[in-house]
Amino acid sequence: MASATKNLTHLERLESEAIHILREVVAEAEKPVMLYSVGKDSAVMLHLARKAFYPSPPPFPLLHVDTTWKFKAMYDLRDRMARESGMELLVYQNPEAKERGINPFDHGPLHTDMWKTEGLKQALDLYGFDAAFGGARRDEEKSRAKERIFSFRTASHGWDPKNQRPELWNLYNARKNKGESIRVFPISNWTELDIWQYIHLNDVPIVPLYFAAKRPTVERDGMLLMVDDERFPLKDGEVPVERSIRFRTLGCYPLTGAVESEAKTLPEVIQETLLTTTSERQGRAIDKDAGGAGMEKKKQEGYF
Amino acid sequence: MSDADVIYKTDALIAEDIDQYLEVHQHKTMLRFITCGSVDDGKSTLIGRLLYDSKMIFEDQLEALAADSRKVGTQGQEIDFALLVDGLAAEREQGITIDVAYRFFATEKRKFIVADTPGHEQYTRNMVTGASTADLAVILIDARKGVLTQTRRHSYLAHLIGIKNIVLAINKMDLVDYDQAVFDGILKDYTEFAHSIGIKAFTPIPISGFKGDNITGLSENTPWYRGPTLMEHLETVEVNSATDADKPFRMAVQWVNRPNLDFRGFSGQIATGTVRPGDAIRVLPSGKTSSITRIVTMPSEAGPAGGAGGGGDLEQAVAGQSVTLCFADEIDCSRGDVIGQADNPPQAADQFEATIVWMADEEMLPGRPYWLKIGTQTVTATVQHPKYQVNVNTMEHLAAKTLDLNAIGVANLSTDKQIVFEPYEANRTLGGFILIDKISNATVAAGMLHFSLRRAQNVHWQATDVTREFHANLKNQKPAVLWFTGLSGAGKSTIANLVEKKLARMNRHTFLLDGDNVRHGLNKDLGFTDADRVENIRRVGEVAKLMTDAGLIVITAFISPFRSERDMVRQMMQPGEFIEVHIDTPLAEAEARDVKGLYKKARSGELKNFTGIDSPYEAPEDPEIRIDTTGMTAEQAADAIVARLIP
């Protein structure tokens, strides 16, 4: 039936929109880069980039702003995906944070600020990238819902939510003033379920931590943390317990809460996601700072 | 038991059979829509309700919502759904949304993207922005207030941006006791208005976003209403991409994919139509043709070719899909070009009439060059003074010298080179554009092309410092056009040549445009059909006009058989500068002379469309000069003409 083939599915429309955005940036920006955090959203974004430019490799490098505190399994997948995609992988670690030994156990919010926010700004300045792809979604958080797909940053990487360019149709104005750079979010219009379904349909490689397995854990402040390496300082009397856990979102392992789960396959993970009653980012400590407007404030300061 | 449980029965499937659930949800389509209403019409509440009823709100968000509702909510102890939707900190304090926000929810049939656009007076630009990607608009009306100025404005804007599906959601029915008379009264008012601005059809639904009536389940409170619920309508209405696939094939080239010498592909998102390998295509604006050999997408180990889960070469691609096309021939094609169906390609032009929505604080400057981006083409454009501005509250046309923030007007614009386009009505991608300030790089306007202009009087004129008066003074003469008209063989060229010689001897700066000569160059693409004769004269007129601007005395020798075209040229010139010279030789006399042997050929049928034989000659009714060649020599005729020009 001819009419049946004409109605693109929601995933086909989302995929085509993202590919269109990726190609526009490559055509109009001078030096684009893809921020690659190794999470599931990054995995989908990377897959879309490979599709957009096939049979060429994506004509920009991957940038991992590293905090040195990611899960080991994330570093493994990162290196593997760079090899498979034929893309250059740039890893940036803020030298000042490294020198001062900034870590999530002793430094609280400063950890995110120095390694991630400052690290990202430094890396973009160092390489002179004028456009950076990010895997943020509008459904993640209220302030993101109002952010444009092409989101401009001042020379000091600040975001001005009151002064955003109107985006009409699929026309993106990529012209920037001296010193400005653009964050581009090709999967803005995807939801968490869209991401999972796309991974499922396309066999997109993701970090095994998204699937349940027995892992050493401790419970702190109502969060289940995984003891990923020997740097995890155990408190007096604290003994890691083997639990069947998985992660709904991945960041620095001391800041990322796990959930107890038996979901070992992708459909089981999706099932669990759909039946769950708490939102995705709840496992991350970062959004809880500064109350309801936490993320908006962070973004104005230059957090991605 | 809420209505939502009835609609979202597949929730049970998640627990029972996740694979079956995934299968169902893989075949969902997507609908993008906007909600428009005044500040207190309950827009945010409605969206919050849709999110809530489709289970898109998590427990932790609900907890936060309940806490926020008590703190800053406007609904007392009840949950204030609006707080779910109103995002940025500053706006939450003001209690209004001030920008475009996008929200997501899904049912088993569809994924929805809602553009939440503000009802505040000064934010026309936000609504136009949100509407530009929408398949449908929900116009909210407060049942207690009826059709307001804002209602009319939002409807006008939705219609202007080309949204075909309009839902009239008459909200807050709970506050008017679900009274059918109230609903009917508003419906009557709105129908009258909608028809007056060209909205052909819309779907009226009585709802309460706050109480949930007719959102996902038919309400017992409105037994008199027999139409669909809001959700039911949203789930079944046809989306744009489905209708776009039936139009002729067009794809703007975004990027040329050239990994090595063996592969050359053209990447883009199909704007309209369908493409298959073997299809004949034409690249615009060059007009070069070839055919499609491959539709390339990345091969995938998962799933069959075609779907979002598949990959590899496709047998067919349709409007909305991002693909890479390979051609059979090595023809030039690069970013900005448009690939179209070979026998039905889009047109290219450089002058247009367009509707413009001004979106910047600085007003529009007619004549100033802006960047114009349309599809993947970016060119320099200048906009003329608006023909009129539209009062978005009354739809009246007002005179305007410029357009300022949130103003909507109609104006002509011209681009520095041809762009491939289609009227916005036929094709949003090839008809919608943005204007970008060249200094600030801000997006200052959005526009919709109506049609291209062909008539010269619509060209915007760039003022130059060396004026036509200066040119003329430098040559110490008064510019003029001596426009010779008459039958073939009447003696036009002979006399014109003598006139030029005499003027040259008098130190006059002249130029002779001869019909035959011009057809060797400028007009060599034109034949002798009526249409081509018109175009022939139009072009010669343009050239003559430029030469008078340069201060020359122009002499033209063309049959120029039609009165209307000679008058058109007369209109182009400064008053008094067009001097029509009728070289009046009777047909019999001209045919008897037959200097070039053309009449003979025409009489024998060898030569078609010959003036005087099988194509008409319309003699001037009141020429400035009439030369009767039966009564004087060519020399005498030339002297008479020069004497008339320079007394």
Image (cartoon, coloured by chain):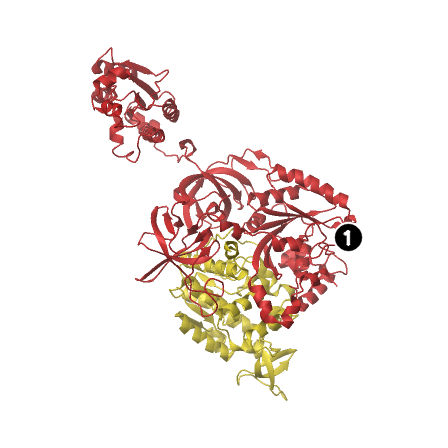
Chain colours: A yellow, B red
Where residue B362 sits: x, y (%)? 52, 44
Assign a secondary structure to mark 1: loop
Q: At x 39% / y 45%, what residue is drawn? A: B343
Query: At which x and y percent is residue B44?
Result: 66, 55
Q: Residue B110 placed where, x, y %?
A: 59, 59
Q: Is B368 placed above or below A282 here?
A: above
Is residue A287 rendered to the left or right of residue B351? right
Q: Given the current orientation, which residue lies at the most extreme right position? A: B177
Q: Is residue B561 above or below residue A124?
A: above
User: B188 or A169: which is nearer to us?
Assistant: B188
Please name the residue that numbered disc 1 is placed on. Answer: B221
Task: List x then y, in percent, for residue B473.
Answer: 31, 25
Could one spot residue B411 in this view of the protein?
Answer: yes
Residue in front for this viewpoint, A166 or B339:
B339
**Circle 1: residue type:** Asn
Whether residue A175 is visible, yes or no, is no
Quadrant (top left/top right/bottom left/bottom right) for the N terminus of chain B: bottom right
Q: Residue at x 64, y 80 (%)?
A: A220
Q: Is residue B468 left or right of residue B402?
A: left
User: Label 1 is found on which chain of the structure?
Assistant: B
Find residue B417 and report its image quarter.
top left
Count residues near mark 1 (Cα–Cα under 10 Å), then give few for <14, some for 14-19, many for 20+.
Answer: some
| Vertical arrangement, residue A83 with respect to residue A33, above or below | below
